[in-house]
Image: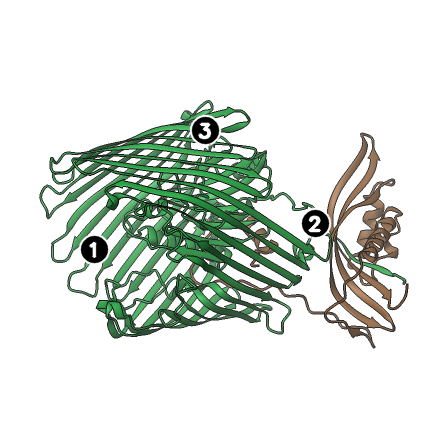
Amino acid sequence: MSVRLRLAAAGLAVAACAAAAQDFTVSGTNTVRWERYETRGAVAGSPYPFTTTTGYDEFVLNLGWQPSSFDRWRGLVAGVVNDSPYRSPDRDVVPERLLLARENGEAAIPYRAEAGDFFAFTGIRTQQRPLKGAAVELQPVTDGDFRTSVLAFAGAAQHSWRHLQWSDDNTVGLSWLSEVGKARFTVNALRNSREANAPEGAARRTQEVASLAAEAPFALGATAWRAEAEAATLRGDHDGAFGSAATVVRDARDNGFFAQLSGAHAPSGTGWRLRGERYGADYRPYGTAVTADRRSLEAHLTGLAPGGLSWRARVQDFRDGFEGPNPLDTRVVGAGLSSPWAALAATVSADAFRQELERADGTLDQRNLTANAFLSRSFGAVIGQLGLLYQRVDDRVTADASPRTKQVNASVIVPVAFAGLQGSIAPGVTWRDVSNAFSATRDVHATLQLFLSGGPHRFSLNAGRLSQDPALAATPDVATVNFGLDYRYRRGAHEFGVDVTTFDRRPTPGEKTEAWRAGLTWVWHFDHRVRAAPAPVAAVATAQGTVPRDLGVLAAVSPGDPFDATVARLAAAGYAGGANLPGAVAWEARPLAEIEGRQRVVVIGDSGRVERVGVIVSLAPAGGGDDAARTWERVRRALIERFGRPATTFEEGEFGANFAREVAAGRLIRIAEWNTDRGVIRLGIPRRLDGAARIEIHHARAFASPRDTAWGMEAIR
Amino acid sequence: MRTIAPALLLALLAAAPLAIAQEGRAFNPIARPAARPALPDGAVRVTPPLPVPRERVEAAVATVAKAWSDKRLETVLAPGFQRRAELADAMQAKVPRDASLRVTAIQGWQVLDQWRLGGTLVSRVSVTVRTQVEFSDATGFQARDGTNEWVMTIRMREGGP
């Protein structure tokens, strides 16, 4: 055999796809869990209504095959062999997520096909939810200034494969997207069908939704702008204002409109956004997050100043029920800032908003004010944190119904290290005083958090006692004690865990509730790779360059980057005043410009390397009508816009008034994941030992299964 | 698996500090190969391509490394190599006289195109190579690591030894 060689190119950057070609990968986890739940006293107040000893075996199997750089297959099989009523309503073998996907750029028409659990996304006003079915995206024209994508899908909105009923709730959709130069045009058409629901007495409902959207960026001098608009129409049936099958509206026709003009002036660090929306009373597409019968106008202004100061201001005007005889007007004026405070070696963030609520018939007339501030200061290695909240409600209709809420929260984070373990201990106390004729109370909540990690060990502990002392004699005093600990030991591909959670509620007078849960967990992580070519060594270059101030920070910082250099990169990009926690740095920031709640960017290190980078989003109300469910939808949409449709999603349970408790009990799970060449970006609401619910977005090498909901940044309060 | 391409990551890195919010479905391009060049007269494309043995790739990489170290890289460059003269000037002007190129690892390779012509199997192969340039200067021994993608044409006589 003779070999003749010609070198055609040299010195090019490594092409990651070339190194990954011809891979067949099998990875996943198997989790065996034993658990005991017990409740004594009033079961109604317990997070664990079933007293039982139970368990399950949960498996997640990821398959990948890449016959060439432009042809990729992906498979996912996840399920559980179940005995636990807390894990799944079904016993025995329960398939939970199934997916087979292929992305082929070598076909005559490049396509992306998915069968199984996929995420249907045509826009926030038309369709945004996980479905079970199939989706195909074709990209027939991708050259030059004209690019086209055609997405077709059909799927059922169902939580369970075992009880899958196509006719219960299915959607068939078609979306045509074309980019001409920098302008983008989208046409969406969808049909949803819901079968007759005998127990609730509703007949079959069908609806068609169509929308036309356009957006275009442009520049005016030193300013960059983007104009967007969408008009949507619905024809058919819906479940009415209360979302109940008993209030079905037939043959409705209505429209939804959206327009937004946003811009930025990079030299001054200023950004702005003007937004208008109008959704008719009958514009209620299934699988969307729009609020029907609402008209809204919003103006937002944000800025960045040298030294790390970021500020924002907003004016919002909502009219709910505007097509009816008694609309509700909500006007919000708010402002906030976060900044390092060099003189105090501290970081401060503050936000205040004034809200006016008025009903046309005069039955509601309120002027509300909410202000909160947060201060974090280092005292050597110790960090002190102080939070203040003041809320005033002036009810001009109901006498003596104008509560004032004053809240002070103080905590210290003390680094601890012993026996090769590092971490922190954080005692804290919250004092809250609510003065009102009907619901006055004075509460004290003392907490203690401990977090330790080192080598194969990770340990978290949280203890808290909440004492509620209502002024009204008829309302019982309540003392609630929560305690939780979680220990994980990793040895090779195996992780062993012990967790205990206790709940003790004692009303005086009243029947007490004592509940606890204990569990033992064994997780086996497997990752098998078969290659036609030799496996590459770790050759990924350290990320360099400017770190964006938005969600791009998640991709700009990768797991495995040098920790100190990464912190320096963020500082150079304007992230200032970060709180240096043991093994982590947290900055007050606003990577999600359209979310009003408190946000932080966090980098966590391990052995001098970045273990994960994340964004934490508070779910506290911000006066704009966004509840936790809507905030979740907005955050997810922002990630979809940045990273495309998620590779996998997992949803269980529904948002409600007690969503934080549902998250803590593992009954409300929201997960969406995007794969990167360095790991996985996961969006979700993790379970925390302190019971707080917040949205977290992590970029890490890998995650446990979605059912292991204790994946949050426990050390970051 | 849905992987965010390196190009996208680079775009994110280069994003302006103030990103303008936007809504709606985005165009997420599917990676596709560049148009294949026309084959020589009489050639028949092999689809799917046959794997190229590891020893052939190693031998080809070693040949390139030796040509670089011997300062006769032009002997292995393809006739249509872009900026050929500029590369030759750089080899003369910028590369230390005693520098040698050592291959530390071949991370992987991929057959980009393949065809048969007159009993010879011709493969265009992309090879990811980790290298180390070694030389000595006034401060002593020096080494410079690098990761490169080399696109090679490897000819193998079918049925031969």
Q: Chain B is drawn in which colour?
A: brown
Q: Residue furthest front?
A: A53
Other-residue count near label 3 (Cα within 10 Å), few / some / many at <14 / 14–19 / ≥20: many
The circle drawn on residue B35 is none
Q: Residue A643: horizontal and vertical position, in percent?
A: 50, 56
Residue identifier under label 2: A536
Residue identifier under label 1: A329
Quadrant of res A410: top left
Which chain is the one coloured green? A
Q: From the viewer's perspective, is residue A381 above or below residue A142?
A: above
Q: Do the residues labelled 2 and 1 touch (CB within 8 Å)?
A: no
The circle drawn on residue A424 is 3
* Separation of marks 2 and 3 at Cα, in angstroms: 38 Å
Using the image, name the chain to which the residue with label 2 belongs. A
Look at discs 2 and 1 and give the one toward the viewer.
Answer: 2
* Relative to A376, A352 lies left or right: left
Question: Do the residues marked 3 and 1 share a common chain?
Answer: yes
